[in-house]
Amino acid sequence: MMVGSLRWKVAALITLACCAVAAVVGVLVHRTTLERAMRQGEDRALVWATMVAKEYRAGTPPEEPAPWTESIKRPDELPSPLRERLAVESPATWYDDRKPDQPWMWAAQWVDGGLVATSTMEVGSDMIRLRALDRAMVRAALIALAVVVPISVCLAEPANRRLRRVARTARRIANGDLDARIAPAPPRRGGGLARWGGRDEIADISAAVDSMAASLQHRLLAEQRFTADVAHDLRTPLMGLVAVVELLEEGETTDLVRGQVRVLRSLVEDLLEVSRLDAGAEVAERVRVPLAELAEESAARVGVEVRVAASGNPVAETDPRRLDRILANLVLNAHRHGAPPVEITVRDHVIEVRDRGPGFPPELLADGPKRFRTGTAERGRGHGLGLTIALGQARVIGADLTLANTSDGAVAVLRLPRQPSG
């Protein structure tokens, strides 16, 4: 599980929120308790100082020292902070924390003759209780986190699972599987978050992705039907045109017309092949094929000068007609859009076609071959179906066709399956 997973981000946010709430509540409780302890200490000290002042003013000090006699002091006997406060107001209090383990609360009040009635109250027990309360709040916060975080992770997992399903479906659609749908099942009645009912943002995203996939599939099927219909409609008059051209008298004009008719015939045949590949009507017929020999025959058939290099005598079980079609299209593409020399390297179940041209366009490497798009400035150099057909026929025989650029040109690598399926 990746650290950046949504469930862990949710858990981290909930943890931070719980820590923030616990900190705020803890600070408020600590401050409230501390202020209460300070007020109680001040009240006790003031009560004693007031009582001492009253007893002192009631008459002359007795011959025997009273319990409160030691509480009558001169101002210079007081701690300086208390003396400064007493100079401003009377009575005055001061919290003495010079000894953190034994804090005191002082109170002082002027009496006759410039003397001061004082009292001191030990508040260490209040501070001990306050520290115990702080520790209890920290333990409670940790216990709450230990309970809340796992629960929050578990509650976030269903939403995270739905989002992963959306992501997987979107990737399948991007890879060409337009039949992929999210279509989440309606929540079951009963416990859990399902009983809340209603739609949420994830359901809206799922519906939008499904709608997008359906729209793309409808448009693609319409395009495929249009391509197939056009090819079939053109084939019949084209065959008649081919027959008529063969009856023309020999000459320069006749040769030009025959060349254009051959181009048109090749385009229609390519369109029919693309329509069959789109419809999934192609089935491979596999036999044992000597790869080096087939590569040489394919290069010779297309009439392009190609150097073939083979490592040993590689043999693969595949469809020779479709493999020949793939190699012929790759060689023609290298000849038209690359630069010589064009090389075919044959290894065990791997065939590479290289050229020394400028390489494949970046958009072709990023998005794959597109029909009727050659990737060159010269629109007249091809109709853009060669690589599309090569890729489609590679899928039929279960091979993997990858296109890449090297430092000195372009390379197409065809990897044949070692154990064909089907």
Image (spheres, rainbow, N blue to C red):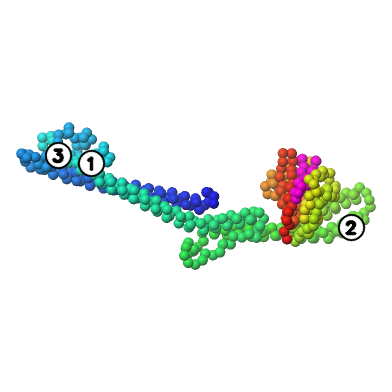
Dot 1 amino acid type:
Trp
* Sooner in the amino-acid sequence: mark 3 or mark 2: 3
What residue would you read off at disc 2?
243
Question: Residue beneath label 3, please?
Answer: 71
Residue shown at 83%/60% (left/top)? Answer: 236
Magenta: main secondary structure? strand
Q: Which mark is residue 104?
A: 1
Quarter where residue 109 is shown? top left
Identify the residue shown where x is 67% and y is 47%: 366
Whether label 3 touches label 2, CB < 8 Å: no
Q: Position of residue 401 (x, y in %)?
A: 72, 50
Check disc 3 and give the amino acid type. Ser
Of residues 331 and 127, which is closer to you in this image? 127
Residue 240 inside the magenta-drawn segment: no
Residue furthest out toward the bottom = 189
The answer to whether marks 1 and 3 mark residues whose Cβ atoms lie closer than 8 Å is no
